[in-house]
Structures are given as C-alpha cells and as structure tokens.
Image: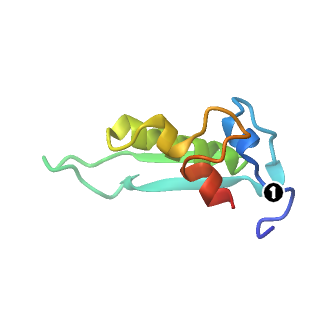
Amino acid sequence: MFYGGSPITVADVLASNPPAETANAFDFVSDELNGTTTSSSGHLRPRDLRRFTDLATPIRENALSRVYLGVHWRFDGLPRNATDNIGGVPLGLK
C-alpha cells in the first residue's frame, strides 16, 4: 500500500469509528477555506484546518458531501453494507 499500514476496506469507511492510524495522520486545508480567498461579496473566508488520523474518515466525508451538495444519492458513493460492491467508494478502493 502506498501510505503503509493495512489497506482501507469498505467496512472501515462505513464504520463510525474507523481504526485510528496515527502514523498516517495528516492535515488538510480546503482551497476555499484557506484564509486567503474571498467570497463573492468580498469577505475573507476563514482558514479551516482539518486533522485526520486515518484515510477512511475523509473518504466517507467526501462521499457524503456530494449528497449534501445535492448532486448524488447516498448509494452513489456508499453501499448499505461492506459486502455490497456498489457505489464510488468500493470502486475507488479497488
């Protein structure tokens, strides 16, 4: 695996508390909430640093964010259970 450790599984992504891999922890700052960009009205957007201790959490959040955006259904990203081979997350992990 590129990042070391054990491979991420669909079960890890579906778990509400995936196993913490603190050796692979990383920080993420969005291109929009980076403290330097402005909104359409000219207001400076705040810097929002996110710290992740594993890769399963941001994978799950990314799949769900597309649902909240209104462009996908939940099943487009996440299957109902770890054995289903449907959705973007299983495809991406393979």
- The residue at 55%/47% (across/down) is 87
Residue 9 percent location from the top left of the image: 76, 48
Q: Find the residue positioned furthest to the top.
A: 16
Closer to us: 54 or 6: 6
Q: Quick one: quadrant of the N terminus?
A: bottom right
Query: Where on the picture, by quarter, is residue 20?
Result: top right
- The residue at 51%/38% (across/down) is 75
Residue 47 percent location from the top left of the image: 42, 48
Question: On the rendered structure, is 50 left or right of 17?
Answer: left
Question: On the rendered structure, is 75 left or right of 42?
Answer: right
The vertical placement of 49 against 16, above or below, is below
Q: Find the residue positioned furthest to the left.
A: 41
Crowding at dot 1, Cα within 10 Å, few <14 / some 14-19 / many 20+, comes out as few
Report the amino acid beneath label 1: Pro
Residue beneath disc 1? 7
User: In terms of secondary structure, where does tag 1 sit?
Assistant: loop
Q: Quick one: quadrant of the C terminus?
A: bottom right
Closer to us: 52 or 48: 52
Q: Find the residue positioned furthest to the right.
A: 5
Residue 21 percent location from the top left of the image: 81, 48
Residue 15 percent location from the top left of the image: 72, 33
